[in-house]
Structure formats: C-alpha cells, structure tokens
Image (cartoon, rainbow, N blue to C red):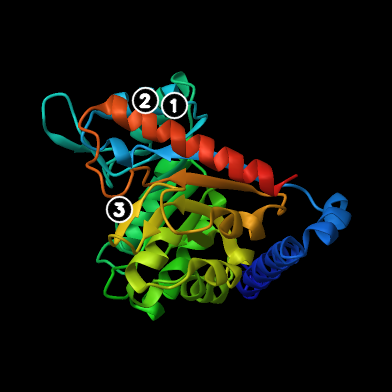
Amino acid sequence: MLPNESSRRRSVTRRSFLRVSAATVSGAALGTLAPASRLLAAEDRKPTQFQIACMTLPYGQFPLRRALSGIKSAGYRYVAWGTRHVESDGTPAPVMPEDAPPQKARELGKICRDQGLEPLMMFSIIYPEAPGGLEVLTNRIRQAAAAAVPQVLTFGHTAGGNRKLWIERFTKLGPIARDHGVTIVVKQHGGSTGTGEACAEIVREVADPGVMVNYDAGNVMDYLNVDPIPDVLKCADVVRSFCIKDHRNWPKDEDCGPGFGEIDHYRLLHPMAFTGLKIPLCCENIFAPLVPRPTKPEGIDTLARRAREFLETVTAGLQI
C-alpha cells in the first residue's frame, strides 16, 4: 500500500458516508412537512422498503426451529436471529455461538430460507468495549457474510460505555464490515449510549458506512424515560434499522409489543418513510402489557401476527 493510500481511502470513505447521510437527512426533512406539501414532494423521493421481521427472541423458551415455523405461520417474510433458545431436550443453546465458524451460520441461513424466511439481522451478544470484543465482532461479521445476513446488532452496557474505545474499534471494524457486505448497527441500551442522539454522535465520528445506528424506541423510553419521537429526528440520517419494541409508563412501567404502548409509531417511522433504503423493522418484543406471557408457542404466534399487521398498517399509511 502506498504511503498516502490508507488516508486517501479513509477520506473517500468519509466523503461517501457524509454524502449518503446528507441524502437521508434531506429525505427525513421532507418527511416532516405538512401532508399537502409532502404529497407535492413525493415524486422526488423513493419510498423506504420497510422489511418487517420478527426476531426469534420472543420464542426463547421454545426450540429455534419452532420459532422459525411460528414466525412463518404468522405471515412474515423476514426473520432476525435472537440470542438463545431452550431446545427440545430442555437445555438452552445459543442461536449462533460467538466462536462458530462461518459455515455454521451459512447452514442456519439455509434453514431459514428453506422455511421461506430471509434473515436480516443477528445479535453480536457482546459489548463493543468488552475484552475480546474486536475479535468477536470480526467473527460475527464473517458469520453474517456467510449467511448473507446484512446487519450485525450491538449495543453498550446499561451503565455506560467507553466512547474512545468504541470509536477506536468501530474505526477498525467498519472497513471489515464493508468488505464483507455487512453493516454493524448500534442501538440504545441505557447509560451513555441510551439515546439515538448519543449513538449517532459516535457513528458520525467513526464516519464509515459499515457502522450505522439501529433505533430502539422502547429502550430509549424505558432506560432513560426520554421521548423517542424528538430523539429519532436527531439520528434519522444514520438509522439503518429498528428494533421494534413499545413501552408503557402507566399503569405499569413495562416494555411491550408495538401498538400496546405509549409510543406513536406513525411519528416514530415518519422520518424514515422516504429514504429509498431498505430498513429492517425487527420485532424484539411482541407481548401484551400487564397480562402473563403465553406459555404455549401458539400464543406467541398470535402476538407475532398482530405485530406484523400493526406495522404493515402503519408503514402503508405513511407512504400514501
């Protein structure tokens, strides 16, 4: 590599990142116009391809294959891999061990597609600043690439994260992710990275299209009691997916499925309605508040279907 090649590549990457982000900001800004103005401007924008997925996470007490069949029966085309499942022998097993070879992820991708489900996202299951975090996230990228899963999800500790180390590691991981056709997405999880604004500040400093933001409105409201609607506007230019989770502060402080809580999903997704991008909407929590969770997988299937229908209604309405 020539002496200035690395810095020149970094400069080009940063310009590309800023150009893409600026275009998305422009689309988000148009999305905040009044309805009449929005209709006049609509021909100049491309609708977002919202990809509504269900995570296997709500089915964690049941085998992974039952989760996949249930998600398919609930009408989904897309799936996101959760963390672990209690298999038929009663033992918990990780969906994808952090040290598994890429071939194992490729096999799981095929299992999903054989069920008629396209996998969109997988959990990293490690904090970016954790010992070994760089190595594990690098292997997650390789796993995701082997399975043709476009996004790897990570987030920080609820007590806060080491911002300097995050930036250092994401700066190294961004090119690796891009080279593998994968995007690392960072979501809110309390502490110093508990808002979309805070995550976006880190992503903008890294300035690499291989590292972007995932927005989790339920976590923003839950951990910090921050209104996610104005917060999402502060990071919309770098949001590339959502973990869908609602939240209620009354009559009980509790996360829940979309449409069961206090978050207005029309306002939440409005800034992203005309980006021209593919934006996964991955349902992480589909449960009803206050009442006990289903003890049989069929009950989870019903809630999964309800979540899908709710999000389909919202996204269709936003793009009229």
What is the CA distance from the residue labelled 2 to the residue labelled 1?
A: 6 Å
Percent x, y of residue 142 = 42, 45
What is the CA distance from the residue labelled 1 to the residue labelled 3?
A: 26 Å
- The mark nearer the N terminus, 3 or 2, is 2
Quarter of the image with the N terminus in it:
bottom right
Q: Quadrant of residue 11?
A: bottom right
- The mark nearer the N terminus, 1 or 3, is 1
User: What is the three-letter code of the residue carrying label 3?
Assistant: Ile
Q: Could you tell me which secondary element the residue under label 3 belongs to?
A: loop
Numbered mark located on residue 70 in the image: 2
Count of number-bearing discs? 3
User: What is the three-letter code of the residue carrying label 2?
Assistant: Gly
Disc 1 marks which residue?
Answer: 74
Residues tagged 2 and 1 counted as in contact (Cβ below 8 A):
yes
Numbered mark located on residue 294 in the image: none
Q: Is residue 320 left or right of residue 49?
A: right
Crowding at mark 2 (Cα within 10 Å: few <14, some 14-19, many 20+): many
Residue farthest to the bottom? Answer: 164
Disc 3 marks which residue?
Answer: 125
Percent x, y of residue 111 = 39, 23
User: What is the three-letter code of the residue carrying label 1?
Assistant: Ala
